[in-house]
Each structure stands twice: as structure tokens, then as C-alpha cells.
Image (cartoon, helix red, strand yellow):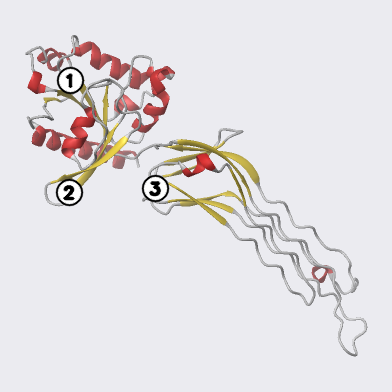
């Protein structure tokens, strides 16, 4: 099951309290203070793992509480710190405070981590309060509470090329042909309900990642047809390929629907390097060139069934990725 959103509660451990103690030994009736400090409470840490693909684990367990610190002891023995808890998430996970909506971290690198809730500081024992004028202190501190809050986790897939199209435009078929991915394929709309990633091996050991985004419908930017859940994954892609079925009655209108839905969701999406891919050339009717004449984006007709123009398509994808990398370097 592909899960790309979760809301969890995290609570770091409280610090251990300091100890009130005085040194006692044979022939020493009234030794000085030797109460140790309490240990630090455990923290909640989140870390990326490139082998993970979904946030499914966080649908079964919603609360995570770290261990509290151990209390201080006599003989100036400090309490042990509580154990940290490390939560693992896929690359591309956005972390947000559920109350304030503040973005805490955007984790896109492997083994990248941040602290969600910091453990409480341990309290001081009475040995810390001794001075030349106050040699028998009985003061001590309670351990500080750990941070706690509700956190939202939102996964946005990271890919080089995002395949965008209406339901049944041939996205899954294309992905299955150019990569080892095996998405569900059928001749009816909404076969794909979750994004699929495929690694495309291209020429001399080069490769890039293509994402098959579930089909969009008009009104997707308003959440229709699970639009928001699908559109969020396009935000991470470097470049876009608009897939249009060459058998559509009005392919220009189909492209405008896709383009407008992306633009209304986020104007930044339509600024990505893009191209138009007319699918199902094996059913070609001769009506498709109207789109090429009226749009400045690169266009190619393909058939995933018989392999028509597939090598040329991969060449075009590689060119789009190169464009995107140049833009990324320019904005860094």
C-alpha cells in the first residue's frame, strides 16, 4: 500500500532529577554534598532511508515517546541519559508542525536527519550548589520536560521525469516498457491509484528516474479525483512529460486541461522543462499535428506497444533533465 501522508505525536523524554546526597564514609560524619545530576531525556530524531518508499509504518502507530533520563545518585554519580528514538522515512519527506504549519525540515538526501523533539535537560544535584559560604546545600533541580508536538509527514516522490496525463493516457504502459517497473495496466480509467517509480537505463551506464503520476481530471487542483494527493508528487520532479492520447477528440483541449490544472495548483510547475508526448501512435488517425503547430513545447509521437519512437523519447527525456540541471545550478 502506498501511503504518502501521516500525522504523528512525538514526545521527548523528561530529564532526570538531581539528587540530594552528602558524602558518608568511615570516620567521616559530615561530608560535603555529592548529589549527582540527572540524565538528559531521550530525543525523537527523524532520518531518511533510501530503501523506504512509503509512510505506511506511521499509519499503524501514531505516538512515539522517548525514554526519560535517570535520576542523579549519591557519590556524584550522574543519571544515564534516556535512549533516543530514530524514525526512518523515505527520501522526499516534508516535515511540518501540525499546529503552526511551520516547515521543520525537507529531507531529500540519504541519511539526512533532524531532531523533531529534543529531550529535557537533566536537573542539577546538590553538589552543584556548593559554595564557600554555602557548604551544605540541599537545593536540587527537577529534570526539564522534553518537547512534545504533533507532526505531519508528507511524502513527495523524487524523480527526474514526471509523466502527467488524463486517466488511461498510456502512462503506466510507457513506464513498463522503458523501465523494469510493473505498474497495474488495464484499458479503463483510474487503473493507477498510486504513483509508480521506474529506473530507466540509458546508454553507457546512465540512468534516470521516471514517475508515473495517477491520472488527473479537470478540477484536480481543487482536490477532485484525489487531485491534491497526486499533484504533490509532481512538485519534486525535475521535468514533465504531458502524455496525450492521439485518439482524443480534441488533443489541444486535453493538453490545456493538464497545463491549467498544474498551473492552478502551483505556477512553478509549468515553469519546469516540459514536452508533449502523443501516445498510442499505433492507433494514429492523422489528427495529432494540430497540437504541434500551436504549441512551442517539444512534441513527439510514440507507441509503447510497437516501440515507435521510444529511443527518440528517451533521448528527449535526457535532454529535458540536462535543461533542468542547468536551471538548478543557476538558482543555487
Q: Is residue 274 in view from this perspective?
A: no
Whichever of callouts 1 and 2 sits on the residue coming sooner in the sequence is 2
Q: Which residue is mark 1?
A: 296
- State the image quarter where residue 292 is shown: top left
Q: Real-space Cα distance between discs 1 and 3?
A: 38 Å
Q: Position of residue 269 (x, y in %)?
A: 33, 27
**Closer to us: 10 or 259:** 10
Numbered badge on residue 314: none
Helix, strand or loop at mark 2: strand
Q: Position of residue 274 (x, y in %)?
A: 23, 28
Q: Position of residue 1 (x, y in %)?
A: 40, 37
Q: Which residue is mark 2?
A: 206
For residue 90, side relative to residue 286 (left or right):
right
Residue positioned 80% across, 74% down in the render: 74
Q: Is residue 159 in view from this perspective?
A: yes
Q: Position of residue 169 (x, y in %)?
A: 22, 22
Q: Comparing marks 3 and 2, which lies closer to the viewer?
A: 3
Q: Real-space Cα distance between discs 3 and 2?
A: 23 Å
Whichever of callouts 3 and 2 sits on the residue coming sooner in the sequence is 3
Kindly check if marks 1 and 2 are in contact, taking CB atoms under 8 A apart as contact: no
Residue positioned 24% across, 14% down in the render: 254
Numbered badge on residue 52: 3
Helix, strand or loop at mark 1: loop
**Closer to us: 143 or 67:** 67
Q: Comparing marks 1 and 2, which lies closer to the viewer?
A: 2
Whichever of callouts 1 and 3 sits on the residue coming sooner in the sequence is 3
Amino acid at each position: 500500500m502506498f501511503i504518502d501522508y501521516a500525522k504523528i505525536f512525538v514526545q521527548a523524554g523528561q530529564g532526570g532529577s538531581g539528587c540530594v546526597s552528602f558524602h558518608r564514609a568511615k570516620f567521616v560524619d559530615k561530608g560535603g554534598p555529592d548529589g549527582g545530576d540527572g540524565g538528559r531525556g531521550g530525543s525523537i530524531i527523524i532520518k531518511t532511508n533510501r530503501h523506504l518508499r512509503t509512510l505506511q509504518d506511521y499509519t499503524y502507530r501514531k505516538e512515539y515517546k522517548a525514554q526519560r533520563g535517570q535520576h542523579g545518585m549519591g557519590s556524584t554519580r550522574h543519571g544515564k541519559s534516556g535512549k533516543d528514538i530514530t524514525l526512518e522515512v523515505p527520501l522526499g519527506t516534508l516535515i511540518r508542525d501540525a499546529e503552526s504549519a511551520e516547515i521543520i525540515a525537507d529531507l531529500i538526501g540519504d541519511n539526512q536527519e533532524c531532531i523533531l523533539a529534543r529531550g529535557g535537560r537533566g536537573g542539577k544535584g546538590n553538589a552543584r550548589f556548593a559554595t564557600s559560604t554555602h557548604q551544605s546545600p540541599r537545593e536540587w533541580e527537577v529534570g526539564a520536560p522534553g518537547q512534545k508536538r504533533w507532526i505531519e509527514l508528507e511524502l513527495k516522490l523524487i524523480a527526474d521525469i514526471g509523466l502527467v496525463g488524463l486517466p488511461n493516457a498510456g502512462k503506466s504502459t510507457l513506464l513498463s516498457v522503458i523501465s523494469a517497473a510493473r505498474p497495474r495496466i488495464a484499458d479503463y480509467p483510474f487503473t493507477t491509484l498510486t504513483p509508480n517509480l521506474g529506473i530507466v537505463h540509458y546508454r553507457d551506464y546512465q540512468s534516470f528516474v521516471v514517475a508515473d503520476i495517477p491520472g488527473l481530471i479537470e478540477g484536480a487542483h481543487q482536490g477532485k479525483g484525489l487531485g491534491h494527493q497526486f499533484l504533490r508528487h509532481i512538485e519534486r520532479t525535475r521535468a514533465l512529460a504531458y502524455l496525450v492520447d492521439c485518439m482524443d477528440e480534441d488533443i489541444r483541449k486535453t493538453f490545456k486541461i493538464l497545463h491549467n490544472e498544474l498551473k492552478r495548483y502551483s505556477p512553478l510547475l509549468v515553469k519546469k522543462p516540459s514536452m508533449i508526448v502523443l501516445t498510442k501512435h499505433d492507433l494514429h488517425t492523422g489528427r495529432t499535428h494540430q497540437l504541434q503547430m500551436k504549441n512551442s513545447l517539444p512534441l513527439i509521437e510514440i507507441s509503447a506497444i510497437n516501440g515507435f519512437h521510444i529511443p527518440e523519447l528517451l533521448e528527449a527525456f535526457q535532454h529535458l533533465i540536462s535543461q533542468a540541471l542547468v536551471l538548478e545550478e543557476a538558482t543555487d
